[in-house]
Amino acid sequence: MAALSRLLAMLVAPAALAAQAQLLTFTETSRETNEIPLGYPVPMPVDSLTPVDGFRSYAALRARLAALDTDSTDITEVEIGRTVGDRPIHAYRIGDADTTTTEGFAEPAALINGGIHAREWASPEVVAGLVERFAQRRGDGGFYRYLLDNLSLVVIPVLNVDGFLHTQRHPTQTLQTEYAGDAIPAGVPAEYRNYPRDGRMRRKNLRDVDENLCPAVHSGCMNGVDLNRNSDSRFFDSGNQNSDDVGSLLYHGAFGGSEPETQALYAAADLAPRARLRFYADTHSFSRVFFGVDTGVRRRDTLARRLAERMSAATTGDAGRYPYDPSPPDYGIGSTDEYFGFGLQIPSYTLEIEPQSDSAREGYGGYGYHHDGFILPDAQIARVRAELADAYGLGLYRIAGPPVLLSAQIRRADDGRIVYAARWQRSGAARRLQVDTREALQAEVDYRLWLGFDKPMRVRDAAGAVTQYRGQNAPLAPAIAVEGLDRTGAAFRFDLQTTADGWLEGGDGAPDGRLRYADDAYALDFRLPASLPLADARRANLRVDVQDLSGQALDADPATVLDWAAGWSGYEDEQGRDDTDSGGADRTQVLVGDGDSGSGGGGGGALGHAALLALSLLGLSRVRQRIPSSR
């Protein structure tokens, strides 16, 4: 009976549609009959192989990305499926050729989608712009090289290829109508009830649409499936901003995952691969918000919020510019962020980029047409591309994993002799600390300390000075101390003076160069006072407390390798807990171990968490000392 009702509705729709529909033309200022003035030049597709102040044609975007695939070993084009109109859909895998990190562990993965709604031209530009950012900066030796070596990123610039091409063939025309199959909320202004549906403002794919006929005042132009309602999820039932009416803007399709474009998205997840995914984002406009889902898993939900806030701050420095707005666990619309958020328990977003709602409110000089949020002015897209590349870059860096202190070295300043050297090495699915040299430190002797981390910890400004990544506020200098227990069991601690200038951009290894990437190592010169009881200490270690450039603290126990399981696993705090997602100071570099009494020696191992916890508790009554740097 329901199917018969839908069929009857389709049969009578043309007459009703003809009475309501209008074929309208976008203009800059003209207000003649059936014209919509935007208040700025109407964007037109541009055939350019490089970014412009405007929106490139689909052919130009394809040619540009295909060229990057040819020119770079870090960018690989993959056909992931074909559209309902039998056009190829391409994804781009961004990363080096292997599937392991530089340490040999399995790489994490991320998936970013674009162009799921045809009319949202800013989306393909932003996602393609991210590919271009990686291509341009792959040789930076730092931030982007690290991501390429240690993360598998898959991006889809245009998922709804048929619909996107359709909008670009009709850049100035739209079919606007109110349709009975759409549930229109009470109190919506009258002008909003006339929805633009086809031509430049097509939203859906081209399921059962005659491309040669539309846009026109014809019922068939309202067909198609909203691909962001077509996910195979537990929220597929009609309602909650989706519809089982084939003419609705929110028609969810015949069944979950019915559309070949949706299946292509799933294939891209498998390419990532799916089992390693830690991040998903579907790039849309408009609204300027991180939509998301709360799945009811507290740690996952908290981390998803933190990540969205950090990414928002990376756009303009304002953590509230793109507010985070998750739906509750018992609500859904059949969107792709629900599919990945609930299915994989990872941070998963629908990122709505600007304009916020209409161009007049954004200060673009528009006249406030109720759907011009889908038509970002040409003059704004270069800025938006750059802002969102910064935001996505920060998010990818953060989900690649919190930082780990991998290596430490201390050498005498007078003759360069190494007195302490230790490094964490892969041992199966974990790490083992290999101590190559450990000799007693002496008071009133100048030393140089060098620390190597697993990722770039800082970025630099145009003048080469260490600075914050845009919108972030991590302390630029680490906090480093020598701490321990004297022969009586009393705790002591001596803080070394640190500055941001200690980060090492170039060079090759200790004592003055980076470990692998620009600014992944830190060095300082120090001298210990005679009052420090190292000669007969029960134990002593370095205490290194530092945040990466996104504000994540160290993994306090590098022995267990970080991974994702609806929250971080193997990410310990200073008490050895790995369920807090907070990390803490690293105390695993042991200068004097139990029974050493300050003597030298090699071998492996580190203080256990029980001993480190004892140091923390005893340290409540310690006396701190601080000395100036001798550098």
Image (cartoon, rainbow, N blue to C red):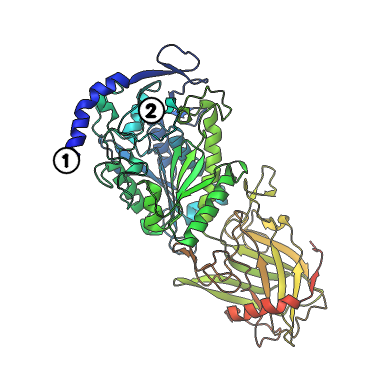
Residue 159, position as x, y percentages in the image: 35, 39
Which residue is nearer to you in this view: 529 or 259? 259
Which residue is nearer to you in this view: 452 or 484? 484
Instruction: Determine which quarter of the picture holds residue 80.
Output: top left
Picture quarter with the N terminus = top left
Residue 195 numbered mark, or none: 2
Q: What residue type is labelled 1?
A: Met
Which residue is nearer to you in this view: 488 or 79? 488
Q: Identify the residue shown where x is 73% and y is 84%.
A: 537
Q: Which of the two discs, 2 and 1, labels the residue nearer the N terminus?
A: 1
Nearer the camera: disc 2 or disc 1 = 1
What residue is shown with label 1? 1
Picture layout, residue 285 above or below residue 255: above
Residue 371, position as x, y percentages in the image: 45, 28
Residue 589, position as x, y percentages in the image: 63, 73
Q: Is residue 34 left or right of residue 307?
A: left
Picture quarter with the C terminus = bottom right
Q: Is residue 322 left or right of residue 27?
A: right
Residue 502 numbered mark, or none: none
Q: Is mark 1 on a helix, strand or loop?
A: loop
Considering every residue shown, the one lying at the far front of the view is 186
Residue 608 appears in view: no
| Image marks 2 and 1: residues in contact by CB distance under 8 Å | no
